Amino acid sequence: TDAAAPETAVPLYERFMRRLADRGLTVASGRFGEMMDVELVNDGPVTILLEPPQGAS
């Protein structure tokens, strides 16, 4: 896959989580890279997909 190596991805993930929390959002996480069963309820008028800019790595 095009996924980043854990030594690159984990700090980015942790920074993302901190920035969400800094903005007052409730944040919870599991263990990075582990298999998890999650449940999602789309309760709103829109779903937002986050994708990197073209050419970003």
Image: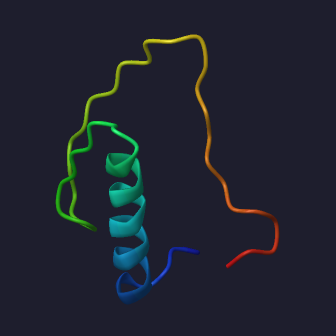
Residue drawn where x is 43% and y is 72% of the image: 12
Question: Does residue 2 sit above or below 47 in this rendering?
Answer: below
Q: Is residue 48 left or right of residue 35?
A: right
Left or right, residue 8 beside residue 48: left
Q: How many marks?
A: 0
Give the vertical position of 44 relative to 15 (above or below): above
Can you give x and y, in whole percent of width and height, for residue 18 in the image?
A: 33, 59
Q: Position of residue 53 (x, y in %)?
A: 77, 63
Q: Quadrant of residue 1?
A: bottom right
In-front residue for pair 10/21: 21
From the viewer's perspective, tell me whether residue 52 is left or right of residue 33: right
Q: Which residue lies at the image location 61% right of the left edge and 19% below the top edge?
A: 46
Furthest toward the right, the residue is: 54
The residue sitting at 22% across, 51% down in the picture is 29
- Colouring convention used in this rendered image of the protein: rainbow
Nearer to me, 46 or 39: 46
The quadrant in which the C terminus is found is bottom right
Q: Quadrant of residue 31?
A: bottom left
- Nearest the eye: 3 or 46: 46
**Picture layout, residue 2 above or below residue 44:** below
Residue 25 in the image: state x and y as whole percent. Answer: 34, 37
Residue closest to the eye, 10 or 1: 10
